[in-house]
Image: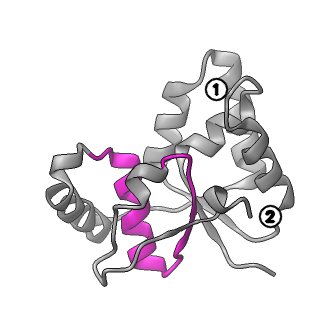
Amino acid sequence: MPAAVLVDTGPIVAYLHRGDAWHAASKRFFQGWRGGLITTWPVITEAAYLSESTKARMAMVQWLQRNLQVAPQDAQDCAAIERYFRKYADRGPDLADLSLLALAERTGVRDVITVDAADFTIYRLSNGRALKNLLARGD
């Protein structure tokens, strides 16, 4: 079984909205992936905010219940998020992205799916390693 992958906001929104430019790539990924899908509450909150309607938010929550594990985050994760906010302050990072970096630090999961290639090619974990964006590679 493939390992787990961290899931960012963009692929969730794209998968559930046929008109999104990333819909086909997100659909292909989610339908083909056989490993775990892990995300954070900041990602879910951002995806709900970006959803077009209450109906879309309901569809998202129903899909999430069947497909994603939402990892709890604690004070240690908050400390990591604060470090990342300081490190990447010049980029204006968002909480959702940094919550995924903190989760990667804690869990050792180094693969992510995101449509935000610009930021995720810059972000580095405390050991200097980047996350691998499987969506960008077309996996």
Provide the secondary structure element on which disc 1 rests: helix
Q: Residue 35: give x, y in percent of width and height.
A: 76, 71
**On-image quarter of the N terminus:** bottom right
Left or right of 80 in this view: 29? right
Q: Amino acid at mark 1?
A: Arg
Please say if 58 is above or below 30.
above
The residue most toward the right is 31
Residue denoted by label 2: 33
Residue denoted by label 1: 57
The residue most toward the top is 53
Q: Residue at x 43, y 68 (%)?
A: 103
Left or right of 28 in this view: 36? left
**Between discs 1 and 2, the one toward the N terminus:** 2
Q: CA distance from mark 1 to mark 2?
A: 23 Å
Left or right of 15 in this view: 75? left
Q: What is the number of the mark on residue 24?
A: none
**On-image quarter of the C terminus:** bottom right
> Which is more toward the observer, 24 or 36?
24
Q: Residue at x 69, y 79 (%)?
A: 3
Q: Residues within 10 Å of mark 2 (few under 14, many from 20)?
A: some
Q: Residues within 10 Å of mark 1 (few under 14, many from 20)?
A: some
Q: Quadrant of residue 105?
A: bottom left
Q: Residue at x 47, y 37 (%)?
A: 45
> Which is more toward the observer, 32 or 77?
32
- The residues colored magenta run 93-116
Q: Residue 109: give x, y in percent of width and height.
A: 53, 76
Provide the secondary structure element on which disc 2 rests: loop
Magenta span contains residue 110: yes
Q: Residue at x 52, y 75 (%)?
A: 110
Q: Amino acid at mark 2?
A: Trp
